[in-house]
Amino acid sequence: MSTTLHESAAATPPTAAPRSPAAADARYDTLVATLRDIAAEHPDVVLASSLAAEDMVLTHAIFANDIPIEIFTLDTGRLNPETLGMIDTITAHYGKAIRVVRPDPAAVEQYVTEHGPNAFYESVPLRKACCEIRKVVPLRGALAGHSAWITGQRREQAVTRGELPDREHDPVFGLEKYNPLVLWTQDDVWQTLRRLGVPTNPLHDRGYPSIGCEPCTRAIRPGEDLRAGRWWWESSDSKECGLHAGNVSATPVSVVEFSKRSG
Ligand code: SF4
């Protein structure tokens, strides 16, 4: 009987390299070629980085190969110190900076004044309103005028991403959206990070496979969905923050099916 990826998720980064070094090299080379193709088709393409593992694979591929793709991250004002520290870590490691985008201070202050600093625990609408102010609106501003953006989303990350394509038109922000890691597994990501010596967020080693704002993210236990630690007080089918509002599938992806498709 096949096991769903969500059932088999590791709470901490996998320790064993699941595939041969040659396969890992080929997978990474394909990624680099794909990013070059995207940059050639969209000279203004940008990578929106969460500073988590998947986005560090993309950041390394872009910076180490001098691919002309701008990288930015959203500092929501509620990130963990470890996550914020990745901004300086990246600059020190690659000698290149990523752009930091922040929310409108007046909008944040109004939300906090009207609802309190942690109102996102009280209801899904209040949680989504906070994400709208701290994430969605700043992202919309960062993407304005661009023809395409890149994300580190993978199908196996959550039930909401089970049918994610590698390229799609983003109806929310009105531009092309590329998900070049769509078929990568968690093992693929960590095998590449370790082989290439890519710096990673220390929270990954403490049970955080998915990292968001500090008050809305917790470590997961072995066997939990990779995004179970995100907004853990909500049902799994509402766990998107508005950055990827097109993710509506609730179809789990099996390990067996995924291995065949990505092999
Ligand atoms: S993840 Fe939490 S703190 Fe961050 S923007 Fe969304 S609701 Fe607000």
Image: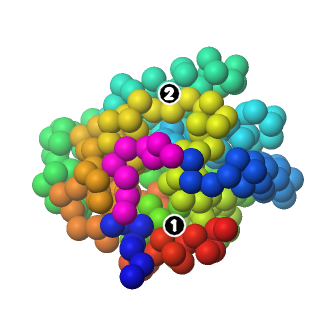
Secondary element at image label 2 = helix
Residue 61 shows in this picture: yes
- Which secondary structure class fits the magenta region best? loop
Q: Which percent across, then down, holds residue 49?
A: 55, 43
The kind of secondary structure element at disc 1 is helix
Quadrant showing the C terminus: bottom right
Q: Nearer the viewer, residue 161 or 105?
A: 161
Q: Is residue 10 found inside the magenta-colored segment of the image?
A: yes
- The residue wearing badge 2 is 86
Q: Which residues are magenta?
A: 8-16
Vertical placement of residue 102 versus 188, above or below? above
- Is residue 88 shown left or right of residue 115? right
Residue drawn at x 70%, y 19% is: 95
Q: Quadrant of residue 175?
A: bottom right
Residue toward you, 114 or 7:
7
Q: Residue at x 65, y 25 (%)?
A: 97
Quadrant of the rendering where the N terminus is positioned: bottom left
Q: Earlier in the sequence, mark 2 or mark 1?
A: 2
How far apart in space, not on screen, are marks 2 and 1 (Cα)? 25 Å
Q: Say whether marks 2 and 1 touch (CB < 8 Å).
A: no
Q: Which residue is mark 1?
A: 155
